[in-house]
């Protein structure tokens, strides 16, 4: 590849990274929020390398750029090399969409860590819980404090299969999209909304298995479903959003 093209790619990649990390929240689709400084630093380095290469080319023209290296013509850049421009331009013009139901249906479920002892649940009703906390209470809390409690969970819809069932889902990043895992709670008593719809769902534990043991299913008998706006950072299992 000719040096001008290399210089252009470095600059585009640098500008693209700086754009998504400094001026948008798009970077949260791919990495955890804590990695933002590294993205900014990488963008600055790439942009500076591109500028340095451009300056060096002006001062010391490369024989490849003139097509006169040992009498051979190297003026043509392979067409396939231009495809490398698309990843850089996508950061500026069209970023890939966030992970959603398609990924969740095929991803590994996140192991729920064992917890020794549970604090008393507040009297609030409905009780806001994360999907992870709800699952822990259902499968590990031998006091069965979650029984008959009305809870509110927030996540997006993932179809459960051919039976028409569905899950309320969260995708969680340990570091980035490549290591994403899911936590899902099965919903009963309500028709499946469109995939990827963000909802606040109110209901009670669906009695299947022995509550407080691993045989209990993380599932909810749905009483109320309300659409909510997707969170800015969708790849955490935070407390439910306030229904709109």
Image: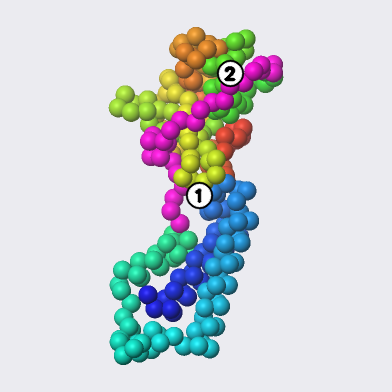
Q: Kindly state the secondary structure of the residue where label 2 is placed.
A: helix
Q: Relative to residue 44, is residue 219 drawn left or right?
A: left
The residue shown at (57%, 53%) is 25
Magenta part, dominant SS: loop
Does residue 33 appear in the picture of this structure? yes
Report the coloring of the rendering. rainbow
Q: Kindly state the secondary structure of the residue where label 1 is placed.
A: loop
Rendering coords of residue 71 (x, y %):
31, 90
Rendering coords of residue 163 (x, y %):
31, 24
Residue that mark 1 sits on: 30
Extreme-front residue of the structure:
70
The C terminus, quarter of image:
top right
The residue shown at (38%, 39%) is 102
Closer to the camera, 45 or 155? Answer: 45
Q: Residue 137 carries which label?
A: 2
Rendering coords of residue 28 (x, y %):
55, 49
Question: Answer yes or no: do the residues labelled 1 and 2 have beta carbons within 8 Å?
Answer: no
The N terminus, quarter of image:
bottom left
Rendering coords of residue 135 (x, y %):
54, 22
Magenta-span inclusion, residue 119: yes
Q: Is residue 77 above or below residue 115?
A: below
The residue shown at (49%, 31%) is 110
The magenta-colored residue range is 95-120
The residue shown at (48%, 61%) is 91
Q: In this view, does 58 lie above or below 127?
A: below
Lower position in the chain sequence, tag 1 or tag 2? 1
Magenta-span inclusion, residue 197: no
Dot 1 crowding, Cα within 10 Å, few <14, some 14–19, many 20+: some
């Amino acid at each position: 590849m000719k040096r001008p093209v290399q210089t252009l790619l470095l600059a585009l990649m640098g500008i693209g990274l700086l754009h998504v990390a400094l001026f948008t929240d798009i970077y949260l689709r791919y990495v955890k929020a804590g990695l933002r400084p590294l993205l900014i630093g990488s963008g600055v380095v790439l942009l500076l390398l591109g500028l340095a290469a451009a300056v060096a080319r002006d001062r010391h023209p490369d024989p490849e750029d003139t097509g006169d290296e040992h009498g051979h013509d190297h003026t043509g850049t392979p067409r396939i090399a231009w495809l490398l421009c698309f990843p850089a331009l996508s950061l500026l013009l069209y970023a890939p969409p966030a992970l959603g139901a398609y990924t969740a249906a095929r991803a590994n479920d996140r192991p729920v860590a064992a917890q020794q002892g549970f604090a008393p649940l507040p009297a609030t009703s409905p009780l806001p819980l994360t999907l992870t906390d709800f699952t822990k209470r259902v499968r590990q809390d031998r006091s069965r404090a979650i029984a008959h409690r009305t809870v509110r969970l927030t996540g997006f819809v993932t179809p459960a299969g051919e039976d028409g069932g569905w899950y309320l889902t969260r995708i969680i990043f340990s570091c980035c999209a490549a290591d994403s895992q899911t936590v899902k709670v099965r919903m009963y008593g309500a028709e499946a909304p469109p995939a990827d719809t963000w909802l606040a769902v109110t209901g009670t534990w669906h009695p299947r298995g022995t509550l407080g043991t691993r045989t209990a299913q993380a599932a909810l008998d749905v009483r109320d479903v309300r659409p909510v706006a997707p969170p800015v950072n969708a790849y955490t299992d935070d407390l439910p959003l306030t229904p709109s």
